[in-house]
Image (spheres, helix red, strand yellow):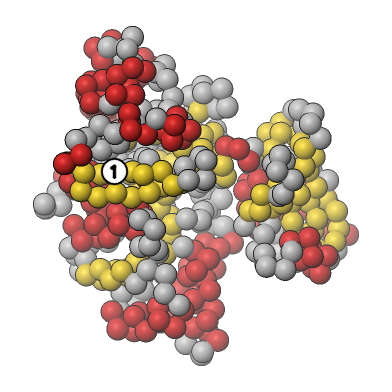
Amino acid sequence: MNFRPELSWEFLSLDQIEARTLRALRNHVKYLKESSAYYKNALWDVSADDIKSIGDFERLKFTTTQTVADNLPKFIAADRTQIVETVTTNGSSGNPLIFPLTANDLDRLAFNEALSFHGAGICNEDAAQIMISFDRHCFASMAYYRGLALLGCNTMRTGVLALDEQRFYIDQLKPSVVVAVPSFLKKLALDLQKKQIDPAISSIRKIICTGESLRDCEMELNAIGKSIQELWGAEVYSSYSSTEASVSYCECEACQGGHAHPELVYTEIVDERGNVLPDGKAGELVVTPLGVEGLPLLRYRTGDITFKITSPCSCGRNSLRIGPILGRACQLIKYRGGTVYPLIITNALDAIEEINDYILVIESDNSSSDQVAIHIATTPASVEKIANHLREVAGVNFPILVSNVPTIQSMRGSSREKTRILDWRKKSGTAEVLQ
Ligand SMILES: [Zn+2]
């Protein structure tokens, strides 16, 4: 298989993309009704030919993780002999969900990732080191590897080795590109500095980050994004992927959102009731992966919160982009008639210099409003500035309690140094701990 970026729809006009998307969605519905026992039943009253507009498609039923977990065999559309790789993803019950792929699905994934890396300015002259897990049937690392290989990069899969071992392979391979989780790269850079080695003089020039957001709602680098860029002296790009979506959204060199590849996925952002939201409005990411044979899905609710940007990008691509992941749908805070996601609050707090440490505590009093308090290690004189910033950036007026670093650390418990959010709304009596 050769990489042919000219096959991508990204540089077509918006009208051309929409026309092709509509045809692709119709074909997708046809395939689902013919090949998936689940959708044959769920779409019994829908004919692909009835889908005459994008609006018609956006009235079809959603698919949830729970539905897939409960009916997995019925979702598998490919014959057993066609399955050539099995990965797993988190099921809603805590059990991993088995996810089968055909040979064409693997080629599709490689094309998707090659397009993403190509958009970030990576080419066959680059050497790449992948520092994320290859264990536990991990989908993302396999997809990144296939994409880089299709691009013709010299790719080394170091996985999640210890810091010293990663450093050894950086010295040996001299990668120009790394794929890694931001907090790990920060740890690695600080470890190098401790050993009197400046990470900024390494061979690494581009960093593809996965697993954690790099930017705030204004698409500016957040605290971890800035520190990685400064420590490594490299360009940083955010990449979001999910096994169910079978696609990734990666930033191009303009770094103004992760580009969807419209020939591979139809992307929507919806509110709690399932209404499609306009540009810039935060809601749940809903994906319809196109061209998947093994486990095809329709309007799949990912549970991840972001927003969409449909205006053309300065890179020349006209494909839809998504912003940073702002949290999970289940983390939505309801407060005095308004709603906000916790990561919008933490991104806002991370940008304030006067804050030495903080923790956001969320509780439920069984009313329509959650109880929220932010414990902040700061001076009383800084409280007004912090409150104003939160109102401006996040539109909330949460109570701010002046505290100190040891008290906040004790609220986390000994093993959770980085916890910034304690969510006590779960019914189990234990807090969901978010980094
Ligand atoms: Zn772009």
Residue lying furthest bottom in this view?
196
Residue lying furthest left in this view?
1
Circle 1 is placed at which residue position?
A: 100
> Which residue is found at the position 25% from the left and 50% from the top?
85
Q: Residues within 10 Å of mark 1 (few under 14, many from 20)?
A: many
> Which residue is found at the position 29% from the left and 19% from the top?
40
Do we see residue 206 in this rendering? no
323 or 30: nearer the viewer: 30
Residue 399, compared with residue 66, is above or below; it is below
Q: Could you tell me residue 363's position as x and y percent? A: 77, 42
Question: How many marks can you see?
Answer: 1
Q: Could you tell me residue 84's position as x and y percent? A: 20, 48
Do we see residue 192 in this rendering? yes
Which corner quadrant of the image does residue 31 belong to? top left
Mark 1: secondary structure: strand
In the rendered image, which quarter contains the C terminus?
Answer: bottom right
Q: Residue type at mark 1?
A: Pro
Residue lying furthest right in this view?
380
Q: Could you tell me residue 406's position as x and y percent? A: 81, 69
> Which residue is found at the position 34% from the left and 72% from the top?
158
> Which residue is found at the position 59% from the left and 61% from the top?
223
Residue 285, compared with residue 133, is above or below; it is above
Q: Is residue 246 left or right of residue 338?
A: left
Q: Could you tell me residue 198's position as x and y percent? A: 47, 84
